[in-house]
Structure formats: structure tokens, C-alpha cells
Amino acid sequence: MSLKIDHLFKRYPNGVTALNGVSLDVPVGMFGLLGPNGAGKTTLMRTIATLQEPDSGRVFFGQIDVLREKMEVKKVLGYLPQSFDFYAKETAESMLDHFALLKGIKDKKSRRSKVTELLTRVNLWDERHQKIGTFSGGMRQRFGISLVLLGNPQLIIVDEPTAGLDPAERVRFHNLLSEIGQDKVVILSTHIVDDVSDLCPNLAVINQGRIVLQTRTMDAIGALDGTIWEKEIPKGEIPQYQEKYDMLSSRLFAGKTFIRIHKVGNPGDGFAARPATLEDAYFHALKM
């Protein structure tokens, strides 16, 4: 089943328009939703997860009307929010067992088997007797995924899952998401471009409540082939280059400042051609 989002609007009482006619078609597999903080990502994810209402618009998951059939959605939905709290003094095993009971797994033997399966799958079996309050950020995220998978969901939403994770935990989490996203709709909402580049064959970019790009990840990169140029400049000259060129980004490397611009045709002026990246495509989309 695919997810279809049709012209969602949401304006908050303070006048902020979080969703401004958002329409998306999300196929089976990993789908990246990229956007800066405040772009509307979390509002969109919470709307799909039936945690808040839009002002207008429709959402369908297969034949399920997400906004009208909330109980049906919850049967197939798994949602990992950006931040969540657990009982810090409970162990991973006891907490997962508790949630399995809430999910309707009444038989103790079946519940134990499910808990063992999920903790093994998220690589936390050896830590099953450890209190959740002692878990690292990555361990907490992996435990969160075990909760998400309890009901064998077909639609999974993960909101900023790798923010604050160290590189090793990020790799473990990437591997886990890649595994579970093979036959389900998994929406990865993030501002970290590398997460989408590594995991998602399809993506959308949201900015100021609007979808400014939806395409295949490789197509987003390919569309900029031959138009990306880089140059080392004195840091203080960034403003003048911003005025003169379509500057996508600047970065420091080994104490030096490098800028990347988008231009069809050689700009001269000491610029060197560079292969396009998803980060280039992302910054280019934000300017649209």
C-alpha cells in the first residue's frame, strides 16, 4: 500500500502556516522528508500519525482514509517521534513486555517470544536487563524501533531519528531502518541530508510548509550534473559571492573556506567543477 497526501493545510493560532497545500505520493520503501527546522516536517508527521488535525486536505493509506478512520490507521501504524520518554527505572525487557500486553498479546509465552525476537532484532538482547534510563541515545532509538515494530506495522514514521547519535550508533540505526524498510512504507523525516542519501531511493523537500521538490534521490543529484562549482575564498568575502552567484553552501575544511555555487556553464573566476551531491540538490531546492 502507498500513502497519498492531498492538499494538506494547517495554520496555528499564532498565525504560522505549518502546511501550505502539501501533496505527496509515498511508495513502499524508505522515503526521505528533508527540510530545515520549522519547515513543517513534524506537523506533517503528526498529522499522518493522527495526532493532530489539519485545517483541510485528505490522507489515504491504501483504502484507509487516515483522517476519518483513525482506529484503522492505528492498526497499521508505527510512529517513533523525535523525542520520547520511558520509565527510566524499568528494564528494556519488562517495558517491551508491558507494551506487548497493551498491544493485545495476552498469552505469556507468545509475549515472551515476541519480546525476545524484537530485542534481538534491534541488537539489545544482551542489554535486556539494563534499565532504560542508562541507555545511550542510540540504544534508546533502537528500543523505540522495537516498540514501533510490536504490531507489525505497514506504515512507519520516524522523526529526526539520528539527531545527536554518535557515528557508530548512527550506522547501527541506518542498518536497522534499511532492513525494516524493504516491504513497508517508511517515512524518514530529518534535516540531515546524509541520512536520506544513505537510505532513501525517493525523497521530498519541504520548506515553509510547501513541498518544493519530490523526486527520486538519484534524479535530484543527476539534475545538477555539470552545474556545481567550488572555490576556496577568504571567509570575509562570502557576502560578495552570495550577491554575485547562486551560492548553495559554504564550509570550513582544514581552516580554509570553500563555497559551492550552481551555474550552467563555466563561471571562470577560479571555480572548479565538482560532482553534484544530494546536499547541493537540497540547498538548491530550498531556494526555489
Image (cartoon, rainbow, N blue to C red):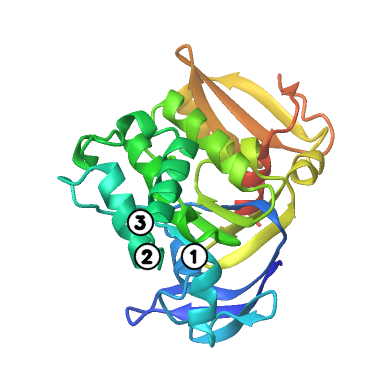
Mark 3 sits on what residue?
108
Q: Quadrant of residue 233?
A: top right
Q: Position of residue 104 (x, y in %)?
A: 40, 68
Tell me the distance, in whole angstroms, between the alpha carbons under discs 1 and 3.
34 Å
Viewer-proximal residue, 266 or 4? 4
Task: Name the residue: 59% across, 46% down.
Answer: 180
Q: Is residue 179 left or right of residue 95?
A: right
Tell me the distance, in whole angstroms, between the alpha carbons under discs 2 and 3.
6 Å
Split into 4 quadrants, where in the image is the C terminus?
A: bottom right
Split into 4 quadrants, where in the image is the N terminus?
A: bottom right
Q: Position of residue 120 (x, y in %)?
A: 45, 36
Nearer the viewer's eye, disc 2 or disc 1? Answer: 2
Viewer-proximal residue, 124 or 5? 124
The amino acid on which the numbered mark 3 sits, given as a three-letter code, is Lys
Q: Residues within 10 Å of mark 2 (few under 14, many from 20)?
A: few
Answer with mark 2 or mark 1, whichever residue precedes in sequence: 1
Residue 106: give its label: 2
The amino acid on which the numbered mark 1 sits, given as a three-letter code, is Met
**Farthest residue in the top direction?**
254
Q: Is residue 146 left or right of residue 152?
A: left
Task: Name the residue: 51% across, 41% down.
Answer: 192
Tell me the distance, in whole angstroms, between the alpha carbons under discs 2 and 1.
31 Å
Label 2: which secondary element: loop
Question: From the viewer's perspective, is residue 122 above or below residue 202?
Answer: above
Q: Quadrant of residue 25?
A: bottom right
